[in-house]
Amino acid sequence: MSFLHTLPAVFRQRPLFALITALHIGPAVAAEPPAGSETALPAITVTGNADSEVSTEKTGLYTTSRSSSATKMNLSLRETPQTVSVLSRSQLDDFKLDNVNDALAASSGIVVERPETDRTYYTARGFDVTNFQFDGIGVPFVYDIVNGDIDTAIYDRIEAVYGANGLMSATGFPSATVNFIRKRPTVDFAASAGLTAGSWEKYRLDADVSGALIDSGRIRGRLVFAREDKNSYLDRYSREKTVFYGIVETDLAESTQLAIGHHTQINKPKSPMWGALPLYYSDGSPTNFDRSTSTAADWAVWDSKTQSTFVELTHHFNDDWLAKAVVTRQEFTNNSSLFYVYGTPDRTTGLGLFSYPSQYDMTNKQTMVDLYATGHFSLAGRKHDVSIGASWAKSALSDLSSYGQGIGTALPPLESWTGNYPMPTFDAAFNGSDFTDTRKSAFFATRFNLRDDLKLIAGVRATSVDIRGTSYGGSRQSDTSKLTPYFGAIYDLLPALSVYGSYTELFNPQYQVDATLAPLDPVRGNSKEIGLKSDFFNKRLNASLAYFQTEQNGLAEAAGYVGPVAIYRAIDAESSGVQLDISGALTERLQVNLGYTQLTLTDPQGNDVRTHTPRRLLRLSGTYRVPMIEQLKVGANVSWQDDIHRVDVYDFGTGATTRTTQPAYALVNLMARYDINKHLSVSANLNNLTDEKYFTSLMWSQSYYGAPRNFSVSLNWKY
């Protein structure tokens, strides 16, 4: 069925020097401008960094004027022929979106799947999100899951490019690419600090300082620090989190800039859940536990550490051309002692659950090299844009699972479970992984400015992937390559309205094996998109409406076991739908971020697949500066999704199935901030206003409940 044919169906300064010397190096949370003037202050432009995208700090806006996430060309959102959503620094601060899960749950179209407390999946347009970038540099993603609680203190904004992003990320799924844009040093001295206290003994400290290190401003630095300790509504669960980020920029010459940065985050959760609560009883009827119920043992821990260092060299050849080289080294470690609970409880007695203790130690070392150039050239009397680049990335992962003695020990009912289980020795059996993932790619793209009102973008990316090693008894071998094309066109219908279309492809190597224990072929995918884009008020408000169609061929789906080895079958799936995105200033006082997605997701026979994914998703955030009380800002955030479900076999003897449904629900969060003076403010946030009880995910046959109503208050200082 053609893309167009299906369209009607869907529409149915220096004080820093001592600090940076002592603490290594790092950034700052730029405070908002004085009451009533937040939308008037421009972001500071740093000498020698003219190619940088405009920072969202100090603008007060819920959007950005430019983005290079899709093409490496620094284009406006309207000039980019794909849906691009933005979570600005102002929105992150207003609603205390201090971790990536909360932030992306407020994004235009990304679904956050949390089947357990300390690992997370993300989906968009029905498929998994596996492409993540930092300042446009892709990170090898060896598993389709994110570990730990990633903090947002170090980021200026978070952008998402929806659909396949074939120029910048030729591997992955045609869902979305999430780009985390780091904070950068400022020339002028700026500092801020915040203290937050909230429900379940949550305490958080944020500190951020930035400025020039010498009089000329040619050397600048920034340091960010965050520390958070909190308990939880979940029994026994608590977490400590520490974040450092430092960066120094120096102008080696008028046209050459060097930046060196480092980021460390340490997570220390206690009694985390590995797995979650059973969804149904042995008779197929649904369970309904208290929201605080946890399967974790009182000795369980899941420590993780992330360290990332990058060196970036930028050179401007002239006003038209620049080149940039970035080398990044990252290391992720996980050390855990965990307690999994399996089985199906009896409805009357609650018995039928069993223990599965295990220790898990993982190290993942990644090295990335990225080189690219962007510029302009003249042809036929008009100036056109071009970008060209190459990248190399290697990820080496090793992990060891050490299984505990006593696996299969019967447990008491979860209603009376206190986590009191003797910590075993972890020497019953051993398994693990040891493999490397090497990716090489090169891309070329150009934007032809055919007329003042017509732009055409065309490009191609060549990618090769070489994976060698083993993972939990199976081969992790893959050696594949592909050319992925990209096409986009934008035509200005009116001064403030454009129509656009784009087509791009992705492929994704797979390590899963079929019934013959042979690895599945790579997934082949593409996305097509047409729509309308507008910008208003000098790009302070951006809007887009898109119809998309996304295909995946050969996607791995679980198909049982051959002995102890999990096997998979390849399936085809297609999603199509509409996505609306509006972000920025509706008035001088009102900031909004609105996203709505509606989709169908089926196999070639028309059957619904991935039914745990919502078909309709609404996200709305807004803040308003109150007239007559200029010091007061109020706001609300609403996230709504329609009902989802999953079907499981509860009686393997008869093949009887049970259906678990999460009805449609909305989460409503409120905020208010009062500026005491130009340096000091106090804010309050209330989350889950209506105290909804809901599952955090239905990806698995286990889940747990989201947080009940909770609040926090903050005291914020800025200079």
Image: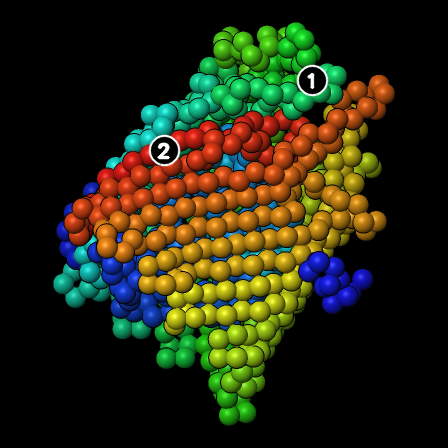
Q: What residue type is labelled 1?
A: Tyr
- Farthest residue to the right: give it: 654
* Residue 92 position (above or below residue 659): below
Side (left or right) of 559 relative to 308 = right
Residue found at x 59% / y 34%: 697
In the picture, residue 446 is in which quadrant?
bottom right
The local crowd at label 2, few if under 14, some if 14 to 19, many if 20 or more residues have their Cα within 10 Å, is some
Camera-side residue of 356 and 85: 85
Residue found at x 50% / y 70%: 534
Residue tagged by mark 2?
A: 711
Q: Which amino acid does label 2 sit on?
A: Phe
Q: Is residue 290 in view?
A: yes
Side (left or right) of 543 relative to 12 = left
Residue tagged by mark 1?
A: 281
Q: Which is more foreground, mark 2 or mark 1?
A: 2
Residue found at x 43% / y 65%: 541
Side (left or right) of 69 relative to 167 = left
Residue found at x 34% / y 53%: 624
Q: Tell whether label 1 touches label 2 (CB within 8 Å).
A: no
**Secondary structure category for the residue under label 1:** loop
- Residue 641: x percent and y percent? 58, 43
- Residue 221: x percent and y percent? 25, 54
- Residue 271: x percent and y percent? 46, 20
User: Which quadrant is the N terminus positioned in?
Assistant: bottom right
